[in-house]
Image: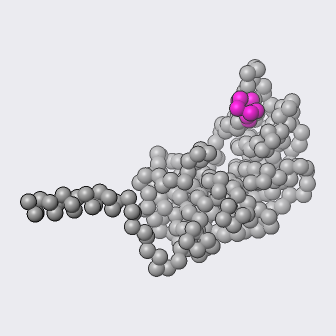
């Protein structure tokens, strides 16, 4: 079943440390609300808006719409400067890791469109991905020194990873059923997912053992019907609890080197030594 990610999605712009403007996509009224210290401004965008993305400089807001277009709002005066045709039923949108491109997940055409930030009307690049792509995220992978785009394909239970420099598919990963939301840590070493039909979230680690692939997905419980995930800037590198249940799906990339054994947690040596010492004293007294 195709899931509309949200009927009301927030996007926030900052000027220094102060909150400048909040953008809200209103699917029912075909508008975007702009909240700030001033009275709320309403921008008519039409076409049933579904998601928002803001350029790193805060100059433009991109709005996906179910009708198959993306509207560009100029934040200086909150006017629509362009409307661009994309694929069928776009539901996810993100800014690329370098801030030069916009990536749109089209759930109805199983594609991702790439737009230019500098010129939204430049020719679109189209990449075929899995079935029903709904969630999309980006990060710079510090190990590979590459910008990567991550697409959650709800219909095919996969993630498509796109290589930013060449706009090619870097990898396709099999995951648990019905992936919807997706996020990546800033260093690109961890991907987090939500699985709508199973009340589970998942984490996939970049292969730190051999530096070439991704781990199997580890699952952890969430609330009912999880649909989106976000990572706060200072967290996301620790294991959520409980962690470690495998999704049972194997990824199509190389995994950790066979035969690699987990290291013993050294922090357990001290309490173990204390317990052994106490036991020995009791036996000898």
Residue 163, x across and y down, in percent = 74, 65
Is residue 241 placed above or below 247 in the rendered structure?
above
- As drawn, which residue projects farthest toward the front? 285
Q: Is residue 134 magenta?
A: no
User: Residue 158: which quarter of the image?
Assistant: bottom right
Main secondary-structure element of the magenta-colored stretch: strand
In the image, 150: left or right of 279?
Answer: right
Residue 42 visible in the snapshot: yes
Is residue 258 placed above or below 275 in the rendered structure?
below
Residue 61, x across and y down, in percent = 79, 40
Residue appearing at x 70%, y 58% in the figure: 140
In the image, 249: left or right of 253?
Answer: left
Residue appearing at x 81%, y 41% in the figure: 57
Residue appearing at x 46%, y 65% in the figure: 246
Is residue 47 placed above or below 162 in the rendered structure?
above
Residue 178, x across and y down, in percent = 56, 57
In the rendered image, which quarter contains the C terminus? Answer: bottom left
In the rendered image, which quarter contains the N terminus? Answer: bottom right
Q: Which residues are magenta?
A: 13-21
Residue 131, x across and y down, in percent = 66, 62
Residue 65 visible in the snapshot: no
Q: Nearer the viewer, residue 215 or 61?
A: 215
């Amino acid at each position: 079943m195709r899931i509309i990610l949200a009927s009301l999605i927030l996007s926030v712009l900052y000027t220094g440390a102060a909150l400048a403007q909040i953008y809200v996509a209103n699917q029912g009224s075909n508008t975007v609300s702009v909240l700030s210290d001033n009275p709320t401004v309403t921008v008519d965008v039409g076409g049933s808006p579904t998601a928002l993305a803001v350029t790193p400089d805060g100059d433009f807001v991109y709005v996906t719409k179910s009708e198959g277009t993306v509207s560009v709002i100029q934040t200086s005066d909150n006017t629509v400067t362009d409307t661009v045709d994309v694929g069928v039923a776009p539901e996810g949108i993100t800014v690329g890791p370098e801030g030069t491109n916009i990536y749109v997940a089209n759930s109805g055409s199983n594609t991702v469109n790439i737009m230019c930030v500098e010129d939204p009307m430049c020719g679109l690049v189209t990449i075929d991905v899995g079935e029903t792509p709904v969630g999309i995220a980006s990060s710079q992978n510090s190990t590979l020194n590459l910008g990567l785009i991550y697409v959650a394909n709800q219909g095919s239970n996969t993630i498509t990873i796109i290589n930013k420099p060449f706009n090619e598919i870097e990898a396709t990963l099999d995951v648990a059923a019905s992936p919807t939301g997706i996020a990546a840590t800033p260093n690109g070493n961890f991907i987090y997912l939500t699985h709508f039909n199973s009340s589970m979230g998942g984490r996939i680690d970049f292969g730190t053992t051999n530096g070439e692939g991704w781990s199997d997905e580890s699952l952890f419980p969430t609330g009912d019907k999880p649909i989106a995930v976000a990572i706060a800037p200072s967290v996301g590198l620790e294991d959520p609890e409980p962690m470690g249940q495998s999704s049972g799906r194997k990824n199509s990339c190389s995994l950790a080197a066979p035969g690699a054994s987990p290291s013993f947690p050294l922090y357990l040596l001290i309490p173990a030594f204390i317990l052994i010492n106490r036991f020995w004293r009791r036996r000898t007294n």
